[in-house]
């Protein structure tokens, strides 16, 4: 009888002994996701800005002539009202993964194990009292029986949690994976949106620059060499200045024209004066400021590009961590740890049963 | 890159190259510049509209995935399903215990 009980206990514990959750792999996945989630918030804000700019560009193009403050058809009004918010849906997707991770965390934490133990203790205690009143005497070793029941109930709850975790991972991971893939695909379009807007702004800067150079040329060619050069900038100095300001833009300027050459006009034309010189100074200063704007534009696009590349890497990292977690579900867990745990628990249950039997 | 995406990008790139030539030269005429500005606006709007369409198409699919994941979340049983039953049993046993005590007192 004694051996039979021991075999039954060990057999039960062998079943529940496998009730382990790949906690380490889950923690790694959660860490990777949290890292991604933090960055994603800023990325979505920037994406929102880019999409708003896109709408401005499209509306600018459509609004030729006077515009109406409301759509001219009910269909137009309906479309704008029911259109799902692109950014909101993406935020919601990340929030849903967060909620899903929280549920998995609760299963990993296994707080319900203690609840089950308490409930079991309550029932066994009541049954013990029942027997005590019916028999007219206390049940010997009831404390040990309660402990044994608690250990087993706890282990069975662990098994349930493990099964629930496995089910939740198997059913939820394909959706998480697909969401992460969509978020990654978004990055490419996010860059295209930013790049397209920036490219348009950059080309308009180049247009303004060459326009200013044209104006500068006109000013010089419409005036002859000043008779008095005192208080007037040297033409070669101005030439050197603008060419040096425009060095970062040079790749986009006509190579037969840049570096620019400035020349006074000839013939019966007015001479170059201090007043003209002031206008020239203004134009040179405008060229300098446009060149700075050009540099900012290039830096901005390169920066957002780097951020998006980093984000793509984080998504890949999260996907790898998720894959590792899924694989860990089927992998035989560290048998040494399991064996140790089984033996440990089996010993505890057996000890409680022995104490229970001894008290009979 | 899909065929449509490729052709949209090719049209855009070719147009931008021409605009770049006009804007980058001090010999371009005012008329050329104005035409290039309008083309730049059109090309920018075209590529952005195409990009935003792709993002919007993905939004619908994402909404479906959110629903799917929420269903998984709802189906997960964090609390053990049988603790309620055990609690119920304990309550019944406690009631029976009370009755048994009373009956026993009456017998004594």
Image (cartoon, coloured by chain):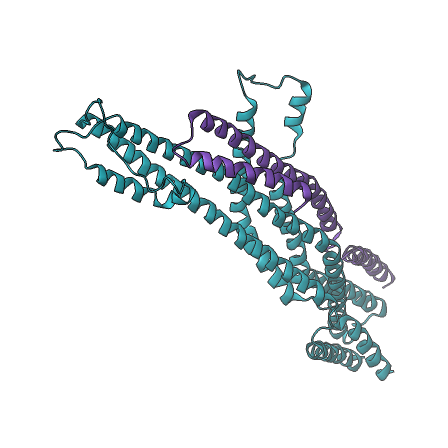
Picture quadrant of residue B10: top right
| Nearest the eye: A69 or A284 | A284
Picture quadrant of residue A219: top left
Q: Could you tell me which residue is drawn at 44 percent across and 38 percent down? A: A202
- Residue extending furthest bottom? A3
Q: Could you tell me which residue is drawn at 74 percent across and 61 percent down? A: A166
Q: Is residue A120 left or right of residue A201?
A: right
| Nearest the eye: A78 or A347 | A78
| Nearest the eye: A195 or A98 | A195
Q: Is residue B44 left or right of residue A243?
A: right
- Residue B21, given in percent of the width and then of the height, sits at 46, 37
| Nearest the eye: A264 or A58 | A264
Q: Give the answer, above or below, for where A355 lies relative to A273.
A: below
Q: Could you tell me which residue is drawn at 42 percent across and 25 percent down? A: B30
| Quarter of the image where the N terminus of chain A is located | bottom right
Q: Is residue A258 left or right of residue A112?
A: left
Q: Give the answer, above or below, for where B26 lies relative to A40.
A: above
- Chain A shown in which color? cyan
- Residue A52, given in percent of the width and then of the height, sits at 53, 34
Q: Could you tell me which residue is drawn at 49 percent across and 52 percent down? A: A306
- Residue extending furthest front? A267
Q: Give the answer, above or below, for where A300 lies relative to A169.
A: above
Q: Mark yes or no: residue A241 visible.
A: yes
């Amino acid at each position: 009888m004694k051996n039979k009980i021991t075999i039954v206990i060990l057999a039960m514990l062998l079943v529940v002994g496998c009730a382990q959750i790949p906690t380490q792999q889950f923690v790694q996945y959660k860490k990777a996701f949290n890292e991604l989630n933090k960055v994603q918030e800023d990325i979505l804000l920037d994406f929102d800005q880019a999409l708003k700019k896109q709408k401005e560009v499209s509306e600018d193009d459509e609004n030729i002539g006077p515009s109406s403050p409301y759509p001219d058809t009910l269909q137009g009004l309906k479309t704008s009202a029911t259109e799902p918010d692109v950014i909101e849906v993406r935020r919601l997707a990340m929030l849903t993964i967060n909620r899903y991770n929280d549920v998995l965390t609760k299963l990993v934490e296994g707080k319900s194990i203690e609840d089950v133990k308490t409930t079991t203790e309550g029932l066994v205690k009541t049954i013990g009292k029942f027997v005590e009143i019916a028999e007219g005497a206390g049940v010997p070793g009831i404390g040990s029986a309660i402990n044994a029941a608690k250990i087993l109930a706890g282990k069975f709850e662990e098994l349930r949690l493990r099964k629930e975790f496995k089910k939740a991972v198997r059913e939820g991971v394909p959706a998480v994976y697909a969401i992460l893939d969509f978020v990654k695909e978004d990055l490419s379009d996010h860059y295209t949106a930013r790049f397209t807007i920036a490219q348009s702004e950059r080309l308009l800067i180049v247009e303004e620059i060459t326009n200013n150079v044209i104006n500068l040329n006109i000013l010089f060619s419409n005036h002859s060499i000043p008779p008095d050069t005192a208080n007037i900038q040297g033409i070669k100095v101005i030439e050197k200045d603008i060419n040096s300001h425009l060095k970062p833009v040079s790749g986009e300027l006509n190579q037969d024209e840049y570096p620019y050459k400035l020349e006074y006009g000839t013939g019966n034309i007015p001479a170059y004066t201090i007043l003209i010189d002031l206008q020239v100074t203004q134009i040179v200063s405008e060229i300098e400021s446009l060149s700075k704007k050009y540099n900012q534009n290039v830096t901005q696009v390169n920066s957002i590009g780097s951020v998006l590349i980093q984000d793509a890497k984080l998504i890949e990292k999260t996907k790898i961590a998720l894959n590792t977690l899924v694989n860990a579900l089927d992998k035989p867990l560290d048998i040494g740890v399991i064996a140790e745990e089984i033996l440990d628990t089996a010993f505890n249950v057996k000890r409680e049963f022995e104490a229970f039997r001894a008290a009979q | 890159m899909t065929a449509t995406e490729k052709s949209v990008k090719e049209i855009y790139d070719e147009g931008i190259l021409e605009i770049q030539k006009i804007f980058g030269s001090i010999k371009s005429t005012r008329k050329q510049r104005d035409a290039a500005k309008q083309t730049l606006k059109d090309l920018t709007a075209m590529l952005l509209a195409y990009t935003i369409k792709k993002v919007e198409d993905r939004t619908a699919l994402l909404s479906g995935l959110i629903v799917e994941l929420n269903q998984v979340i709802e189906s997960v049983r964090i609390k053990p399903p049988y603790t309620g039953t055990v609690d119920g049993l304990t309550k019944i046993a406690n009631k029976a215990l009370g009755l048994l005590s009373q009956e026993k007192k009456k017998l004594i």
